[in-house]
Image (tube, rainbow, N blue to C red):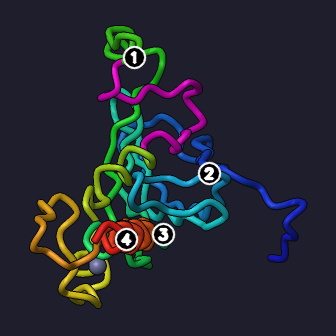
């Protein structure tokens, strides 16, 4: 399939449920490959915009809705919380959710803003987007690191931890402040020059 950027379809997380029907026990496999317009994930690590999220699984008609059992696969980009290196990884996590039919008693009892339960707007259209966002958010590490994402130690092991107390004795420069350090050095030189003048 060839799609140019101009006609690419973004954020199409809809699964057509008409072939499944509502007869309890019916099952259908499905695969969705969805190009996303906005990153999905956390501040420090996410599936970047323009990447594709692949969702593979089955939908099954159950008494009150549709049960989805599948996996989510996508590339991720992030930043190591220790050394700030760019991280490239992949997410591979499960998507196991019940989506209630809108016309069931249980769905009627679901309160507006209840984030724990998914209710279908249309009994024949499964919108997976929010469930994917939620699953990815839970699966990604809150504090991604070279070790957890790329499986190796940080390239510079003498970098202080971001929350470490940088004592006077500590000459190590956190890369986040490296640019500032230049100014500090300038200031130190300046002080030294002034001290020299006083003497
Ligand atoms: Zn690192």
Left or right of 109 in this view: 57: right
Q: Which residues are magenta?
A: 114-131
Q: Say if residue 178 shows up in the picture.
A: no
What residue is drawn where x is 31% and y is 60%? Answer: 140
For the residues marked 4 and 1, what is the alpha-carbon distance in whole angstroms? Answer: 68 Å
Q: Marks 4 and 2, Cα distance to the nearest angstrom?
A: 57 Å
Question: In terms of sequence position, does the residue under pointer 3 or pointer 2 come before the other?
Answer: 2
Compared to residue 82, the image places residue 67 above or below, namely: above
Label placed on residue 74: 3
Marks 3/2: CA–CA distance: 14 Å
Q: Secondary structure at mark 1?
A: loop
Point out the tag, 4 or 2, that comes first from the N-terminus.
2
Residue 41 x/y as whole percent: 43, 53
**Residue 72 can be seen, yes or no:** yes
Which quadrant holds residue 151?
A: bottom left
The N terminus: image quadrant: bottom right
User: Which residue is the site of mark 2?
Assistant: 38
Crowd band around label 1 with a 10 angstrom C-alpha radius: few (<14), some (14–19), many (20+): few
Task: Residue 101: give x, y in percent of width and height.
Answer: 45, 25
x, y percentage for residue 96?
Answer: 31, 50
Q: Between residue 93 and residue 184, name the one nearer to us.
A: 184
Mark closer to the observer (3, 2) = 2
* Residue behind label 2 places its C-beta within 8 angstroms of ligand 1: no
Which of the two marks, 2 or 1, is nearer to us in this view? Answer: 2
Among numbered discs 3 and 4, the one appearing first in the sequence: 3
Is label 4 in contact with label 1 (beta carbons under 8 Å)?
Answer: no
Are the two marked residues, 2 and 1, in contact with CB atoms closer than 8 angstroms?
no
Q: Indicate the secondary structure of the residue bearing disc 3.
A: strand
Pinpoint residue 184: horizontal percent, then vertical percent: 37, 67
């Amino acid at each position: 399939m060839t799609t140019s950027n101009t006609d690419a379809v973004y954020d199409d997380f809809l699964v057509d449920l008409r072939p499944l029907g509502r007869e309890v026990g019916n099952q259908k496999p499905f695969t969705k490959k969805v190009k996303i317009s906005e990153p999905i994930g956390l501040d420090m690590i996410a599936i970047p915009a323009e990447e594709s999220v692949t969702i593979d699984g089955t939908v099954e008609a159950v008494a009150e809705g549709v049960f989805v059992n599948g996996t989510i696969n996508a590339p991720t980009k992030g930043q190591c919380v220790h050394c700030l290196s760019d991280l490239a990884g992949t997410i591979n996590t499960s998507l196991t959710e019940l989506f209630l039919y809108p016309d069931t008693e249980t769905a009627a009892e679901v309160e507006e803003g209840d984030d724990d339960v998914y209710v279908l707007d249309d009994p024949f259209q499964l919108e997976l987007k929010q469930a994917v966002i939620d699953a990815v958010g839970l699966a990604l590490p809150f504090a991604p690191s070279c070790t957890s994402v790329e499986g190796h130690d940080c390239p510079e092991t003498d970098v202080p931890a971001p929350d470490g107390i940088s004592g006077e004795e500590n000459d190590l420069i956190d890369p986040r402040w490296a640019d500032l350090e230049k100014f500090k050095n300038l200031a130190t030189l300046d002080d030294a020059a002034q001290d020299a003048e006083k003497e």
